[in-house]
Image (cartoon, rainbow, N blue to C red):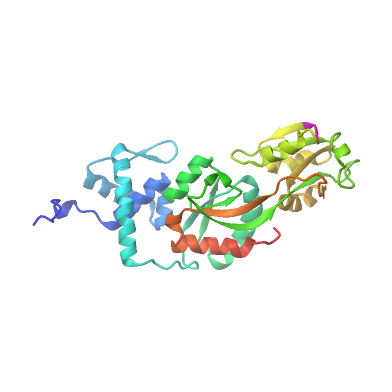
Amino acid sequence: MTPPHGKPLARQVDLNLLELFDTVYRTRNLTEAGQRLGLSQSAVSHNLGRLRRSYGDELFVRMPRGVQPTPFADGLAEPVRAALDIVRDTLGRAAFVPERSERLFHIAMSDIGERLFLPRLLEQLAQVAPGVAIRTSSPDLALLADGLAGGAIDLAVGYLPGLGKRFRQQRLFSERFVYVADANHPHMAEPPTLARMRSLRHVVAAPPGTHHAAAVEEVLTSERVRAPIALRVGSFLSVAPILEGSELVALLPSNLARVVGPRLGLRAQEPRVAFPGFEVSMYWHPRYHREPGNAWLRELLHGQFFERAL
């Protein structure tokens, strides 16, 4: 007997295989897809083989890093995702049980985020969800938006105004810049005056994809301030070791200065000139607003970091 849509029953595909297809398509990585679905490497390979035979196409081609979909797979992606969404809605939303989960969450954050958030987050996970794993990355804005929309990235944390209004967001805390210098710096025993700023040699950090450097540099190079910039680097985390034992100074986010400064013998001072502050928030796509695991992760981060000193 032929089904109403004209395709023989032998060609119909198991929903679990479609879930695998969707996860591989979103992650572009067989190992990560298996971790997300709780499948072994051999099970992933076996089930992909079944999918390939069902569709008569290779679907995914191995590359030096992960896999890339074939044009046929690109055409399947949106219909498969839509079909899975419909089925999930009809079945209800499965509960997320953190103490039993072995899910891999992918969080986008900067180098500062990794230093500030991960130690406390991993400590909390060890207590409430020991099987949960975290992967971080710092993609550019376009890749981040695509990753959040497609589900390859579960959550982004940081200052990301460029993501726009199509993503949901929740504020965690406000951040400000403070002056940081070696504790023995001869001219930093107190907050520098405007005149003193003009004689201090500054280090400016410009991590890729962030707006911090432009905001700081705009103030330093303004007609009113005219402070010299001696060095520009690509990471905030490299600034503190550079300052140690030198007469260079820098402006760092206050939480980072609080964490790294004392360990390297650095002193922080509030600037007398106003520098723009910024909001640190969580960002996610509306498609995953009610997804149980995503909602649990957001609640965990909010509970740990909302308006708290890091």
- Where does the image place residue 228, in percent across and percent down from the top left? 80, 32
Foreground: 73 or 289? 289
Foreground: 55 or 234? 234
Q: Is residue 102 visible?
A: no
Q: Is residue 22 above or below residue 246?
A: below
- Where does the image place residue 63, in percent across and percent down from the top left? 40, 36
The residue lying at 45 percent from left, 44 percent from top is: 146
Q: Main secondary structure of the magenta part?
A: loop
Answer with left or right where residue 103 lies relative to residue 112: left
Foreground: 129 or 283? 283
The residue lying at 81 percent from left, 49 percent from top is: 270
* Quarter of the figure that contains the C terminus: bottom right
The residue lying at 51 percent from left, 64 percent from top is: 296
The image quadrant of residue 94 is: bottom left
- Where does the image place residue 194, in percent across and percent down from the top left? 85, 40
Q: Is residue 203 visible?
A: yes
Chain part drawn in magenta: 225-229
Q: Does residue 227 show up magenta in the picture? A: yes
Q: Is residue 62 above or below residue 81?
A: above
Total tally of numbered discs in the picture: 0
- Where does the image place residue 246, in percent across and percent down from the top left? 83, 37
* Quarter of the figure that contains the N terminus: bottom left
Q: Does residue 58 show up magenta in the picture? A: no
Which residue is at the far front? 223
